[in-house]
Amino acid sequence: MWSYLKDSKRWDKSHMEPDFKEGDQLLGKNAVEVKLTEEFSRKHPVFPVSLVKPYFQTEEDKFPSRKKNPTQAEIVEVEDSPGPVKKIIKARKIRLNGKDLRPYLIRFKNQTADTDKWLAQDAIPDGKLHIRRFRASRATEKCHQC
């Protein structure tokens, strides 16, 4: 019993009344109170600061100095091609408007390398045939390197 009284005296000396009153908002350095929409009205409105992120409406707002990739605009249509296809030189994979595209670098017959163009698969005249040859040639190159 005496130990209980001793503990209560020690607690009374070290106990301080809080400097807030009922109804005060307690948001410290690590908490944020947010306004929630009606669909989240059952959630508690106070969240840790580590979960809070800034809101940006669009990608341009988020990254104002970012420029669009110029390679996306280089893909041309069939009508821009200077002649029949000689061969496919290279392939690459790009993402445009959330879709993966695989353009091919095309060399045209009787043309120099500076007229090579990136074309989408469906924009290449006889595209399936040329792509099959391109893939076969790459497979044999890899086999010879082994």
Image: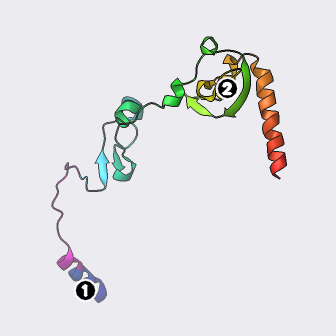
Q: From the top left corner, tell me how far across and down residue 32 is, in percent.
A: 30, 48
Q: Nearer the viewer, residue 68 or 48?
A: 68
Q: From the top left corner, tell me how far across and down residue 103 is, in percent.
A: 64, 28
Q: From the top left corner, tell me how far across and down residue 99 is, in percent.
A: 59, 27
Q: Nearer the viewer, residue 55 or 7?
A: 55
> What's drawn in magenta, residue-wise?
11-25
Q: Mark 2: which amino acid?
A: Ile
Q: From the top left corner, tell me how far across and down residue 102 is, in percent.
A: 65, 29
Left/right placement of residue 13 relative to residue 125 reads left
Furthest residue to the top? 79
**Residue in the image at 64% along x and 26% along y:** 112
Q: Nearer the viewer, residue 24 or 116?
A: 116
Residue, disc 2: 106
- Element assignment for label 2: strand
Q: Is residue 22 above or below residue 58?
A: below
Asked whether residue 22 is drawn in magenta, I would say yes
Asked whether residue 141 is drawn in magenta, I would say no
> Mainly helix, strand or loop, the magenta region?
loop
Q: Mark 1: which amino acid?
A: Lys
Furthest residue to the bottom? 2
Q: Quadrant of the N terminus?
A: bottom left
Q: Counting residues from the N terminus, which is met first, the one under dot 1 or under dot 2? A: 1
Residue, disc 1: 6
- Give the image quarter of residue 14: bottom left
Q: Nearer the viewer, residue 40 or 133?
A: 133
Left/right placement of residue 90 relative to residue 50 reads right
- Give the image quarter of residue 40: top left
Q: Is residue 126 above or below residue 98?
A: above
**Residue in the image at 53% along x and 30% along y:** 71
**Residue in the image at 41% along x and 30% along y:** 39
